[in-house]
Image (cartoon, rainbow, N blue to C red):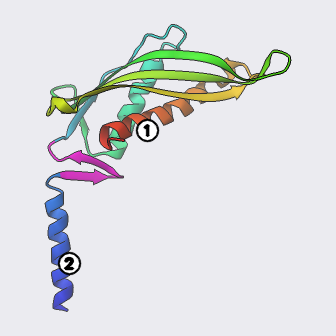
Amino acid sequence: MKHKYLILLFIGISISFSSCFFYSFKGTSIPAEVDTYFVERFDVRASSAIPTLGQTLSEALKDKIRNESNLKQTETDPHIEFKGVVTDYYISSEAPQAGETTAFNRLTITLSVEYIYHLDEKKNWKENFRSFSDFGSNVNLIDVQDDLIDAIQEEMIEKIFNKAFNDW
Protein backbone atom coordinates (compact mmCIF):
# COMPACT_ATOMS: atom_id res chain seq x y z
CA MET A 1 0.00 0.00 0.00
CA LYS A 2 2.85 2.40 0.84
CA HIS A 3 4.42 1.67 -2.53
CA LYS A 4 1.29 2.81 -4.38
CA TYR A 5 1.35 6.16 -2.57
CA LEU A 6 5.07 6.60 -3.24
CA ILE A 7 4.57 5.85 -6.91
CA LEU A 8 1.65 8.30 -7.14
CA LEU A 9 3.68 10.93 -5.28
CA PHE A 10 6.64 10.41 -7.63
CA ILE A 11 4.39 10.70 -10.71
CA GLY A 12 2.78 13.87 -9.35
CA ILE A 13 6.15 15.48 -8.63
CA SER A 14 7.46 14.50 -12.06
CA ILE A 15 4.48 16.03 -13.83
CA SER A 16 4.71 19.20 -11.75
CA PHE A 17 8.43 19.54 -12.39
CA SER A 18 8.15 18.96 -16.13
CA SER A 19 5.39 21.57 -16.45
CA CYS A 20 7.80 24.22 -15.19
CA PHE A 21 9.65 24.12 -18.50
CA PHE A 22 6.97 23.36 -21.11
CA TYR A 23 3.31 22.75 -21.21
CA SER A 24 1.71 20.42 -23.64
CA PHE A 25 -1.88 20.65 -24.78
CA LYS A 26 -3.13 18.47 -27.64
CA GLY A 27 0.42 17.55 -28.60
CA THR A 28 1.88 21.05 -28.64
CA SER A 29 5.00 22.01 -26.74
CA ILE A 30 5.16 25.65 -25.78
CA PRO A 31 7.74 27.06 -23.35
CA ALA A 32 6.16 27.95 -20.00
CA GLU A 33 7.29 31.59 -20.25
CA VAL A 34 5.19 32.05 -23.40
CA ASP A 35 1.61 32.96 -22.64
CA THR A 36 0.54 35.55 -25.23
CA TYR A 37 0.27 35.74 -29.02
CA PHE A 38 -0.89 38.11 -31.73
CA VAL A 39 -1.89 37.38 -35.32
CA GLU A 40 -1.77 40.43 -37.55
CA ARG A 41 -4.36 40.53 -40.31
CA PHE A 42 -2.68 38.96 -43.33
CA ASP A 43 -2.22 41.13 -46.41
CA VAL A 44 -3.34 40.00 -49.86
CA ARG A 45 -0.90 40.75 -52.67
CA ALA A 46 -2.06 38.09 -55.11
CA SER A 47 -3.99 40.00 -57.75
CA SER A 48 -6.59 37.31 -58.43
CA ALA A 49 -7.33 36.48 -54.77
CA ILE A 50 -10.61 37.39 -53.17
CA PRO A 51 -10.15 40.51 -51.01
CA THR A 52 -11.26 38.84 -47.76
CA LEU A 53 -8.80 35.93 -47.99
CA GLY A 54 -6.18 37.53 -45.73
CA GLN A 55 -8.70 38.13 -42.98
CA THR A 56 -10.13 34.62 -43.37
CA LEU A 57 -6.71 33.01 -42.99
CA SER A 58 -5.60 35.17 -40.07
CA GLU A 59 -8.88 34.50 -38.21
CA ALA A 60 -8.46 30.76 -38.81
CA LEU A 61 -4.97 30.86 -37.29
CA LYS A 62 -6.26 32.80 -34.27
CA ASP A 63 -8.99 30.21 -33.78
CA LYS A 64 -6.53 27.33 -34.05
CA ILE A 65 -4.18 28.82 -31.45
CA ARG A 66 -7.06 29.76 -29.13
CA ASN A 67 -8.60 26.27 -29.36
CA GLU A 68 -5.43 24.19 -29.17
CA SER A 69 -3.25 26.08 -26.69
CA ASN A 70 -3.55 28.01 -23.46
CA LEU A 71 -2.11 31.17 -25.01
CA LYS A 72 -3.97 34.45 -24.66
CA GLN A 73 -4.38 36.84 -27.57
CA THR A 74 -3.09 40.37 -27.07
CA GLU A 75 -2.02 43.26 -29.28
CA THR A 76 0.27 44.69 -26.59
CA ASP A 77 3.72 43.11 -26.21
CA PRO A 78 2.86 39.55 -27.27
CA HIS A 79 5.46 36.84 -26.75
CA ILE A 80 4.72 35.36 -30.18
CA GLU A 81 3.55 37.23 -33.26
CA PHE A 82 2.47 36.11 -36.73
CA LYS A 83 2.51 38.28 -39.85
CA GLY A 84 1.59 37.07 -43.30
CA VAL A 85 1.00 37.88 -46.95
CA VAL A 86 -1.03 35.93 -49.50
CA THR A 87 1.46 35.92 -52.37
CA ASP A 88 -0.17 33.49 -54.82
CA TYR A 89 -3.72 32.57 -55.69
CA TYR A 90 -4.13 30.84 -59.00
CA ILE A 91 -6.00 28.21 -60.97
CA SER A 92 -4.09 25.67 -63.03
CA SER A 93 -5.24 22.94 -65.40
CA GLU A 94 -4.13 19.50 -64.30
CA ALA A 95 -4.14 16.01 -65.84
CA PRO A 96 -4.31 16.88 -69.54
CA GLN A 97 -6.44 14.61 -71.69
CA ALA A 98 -6.80 14.04 -75.40
CA GLY A 99 -8.62 16.82 -77.22
CA GLU A 100 -6.99 19.68 -75.32
CA THR A 101 -9.08 19.22 -72.18
CA THR A 102 -8.13 18.56 -68.59
CA ALA A 103 -9.54 16.14 -66.05
CA PHE A 104 -9.52 18.71 -63.26
CA ASN A 105 -8.38 22.16 -62.22
CA ARG A 106 -6.41 23.13 -59.14
CA LEU A 107 -6.72 26.18 -56.90
CA THR A 108 -3.39 26.93 -55.23
CA ILE A 109 -2.80 29.46 -52.47
CA THR A 110 0.58 30.51 -51.06
CA LEU A 111 0.88 32.34 -47.76
CA SER A 112 4.22 33.79 -46.68
CA VAL A 113 4.34 33.77 -42.87
CA GLU A 114 6.72 35.53 -40.52
CA TYR A 115 6.90 34.07 -36.99
CA ILE A 116 8.35 36.47 -34.44
CA TYR A 117 9.32 35.05 -31.06
CA HIS A 118 9.94 38.16 -28.98
CA LEU A 119 11.60 36.25 -26.12
CA ASP A 120 14.35 34.77 -28.31
CA GLU A 121 14.93 36.24 -31.78
CA LYS A 122 17.02 33.20 -32.77
CA LYS A 123 13.76 31.27 -33.00
CA ASN A 124 12.19 33.66 -35.54
CA TRP A 125 11.45 32.29 -39.00
CA LYS A 126 9.88 33.13 -42.34
CA GLU A 127 8.38 30.45 -44.53
CA ASN A 128 6.04 30.05 -47.50
CA PHE A 129 3.12 27.69 -47.00
CA ARG A 130 1.46 26.41 -50.16
CA SER A 131 -1.67 24.29 -50.32
CA PHE A 132 -4.08 23.37 -53.09
CA SER A 133 -7.43 21.77 -53.74
CA ASP A 134 -8.70 20.20 -56.96
CA PHE A 135 -12.07 20.56 -58.66
CA GLY A 136 -13.61 19.19 -61.83
CA SER A 137 -12.86 20.91 -65.10
CA ASN A 138 -16.58 21.03 -65.82
CA VAL A 139 -17.29 22.94 -62.56
CA ASN A 140 -17.44 26.73 -62.31
CA LEU A 141 -14.90 28.06 -59.79
CA ILE A 142 -17.43 30.50 -58.29
CA ASP A 143 -19.67 27.54 -57.36
CA VAL A 144 -16.95 25.73 -55.38
CA GLN A 145 -14.54 28.50 -54.40
CA ASP A 146 -15.65 28.75 -50.74
CA ASP A 147 -15.34 24.99 -50.21
CA LEU A 148 -11.94 24.92 -51.90
CA ILE A 149 -10.68 27.80 -49.73
CA ASP A 150 -11.98 26.06 -46.59
CA ALA A 151 -10.08 22.87 -47.47
CA ILE A 152 -6.89 24.77 -48.34
CA GLN A 153 -7.18 26.92 -45.22
CA GLU A 154 -7.52 23.91 -42.93
CA GLU A 155 -4.38 22.25 -44.32
CA MET A 156 -2.38 25.49 -44.41
CA ILE A 157 -3.25 26.55 -40.85
CA GLU A 158 -2.32 23.07 -39.59
CA LYS A 159 1.09 23.39 -41.27
CA ILE A 160 1.69 26.85 -39.77
CA PHE A 161 0.59 25.73 -36.31
CA ASN A 162 2.85 22.66 -36.42
CA LYS A 163 5.83 24.72 -37.58
CA ALA A 164 5.29 27.26 -34.80
CA PHE A 165 4.43 24.99 -31.90
CA ASN A 166 5.75 21.55 -32.81
CA ASP A 167 8.74 22.61 -34.98
CA TRP A 168 7.75 20.23 -37.78
In depth, the one of 165 and 143 nearer the eye is 165
How far across and down, in percent of the image, does residue 9 sit?
A: 15, 76
Q: Quadrant of residue 6?
A: bottom left
Residue at image location 66% in from the left, 25% down from the top: 144
In depth, the one of 117 and 16 nearer the eye is 117
As drawn, 125 above or below 46 = below
Residue at image location 40% in from the left, 28% down from the top: 59
As drawn, 155 above or below 94 = below
- Number of residue marks: 2
Q: Residue furthest bottom?
A: 1
Q: Is residue 102 left or right of residue 18?
A: right
How far across and down, in percent of the image, does residue 63 sit?
A: 38, 36
| Magenta-colored stretch includes residue 23 | yes
Q: Quadrant of the N terminus?
A: bottom left
As drawn, 115 above or below 101 = below
In depth, the one of 23 and 108 nearer the eye is 108
Residue 158 got which mark? Answer: 1
In the rendered structure, which amino acid carries the disc numbered 1? Glu
Give the magenta-colored segment's residue range.
22-33
- Binning the other alpha carbons within 10 Å of mark 2 as few (below 14), some (14 to 19) or many (20 upward) gives few
Q: Residue furthest right?
A: 99
For disc 2, the marked residue is 8
Q: Mark 1 to mark 2: distance in Å? A: 36 Å
Residue 124 got which mark? Answer: none
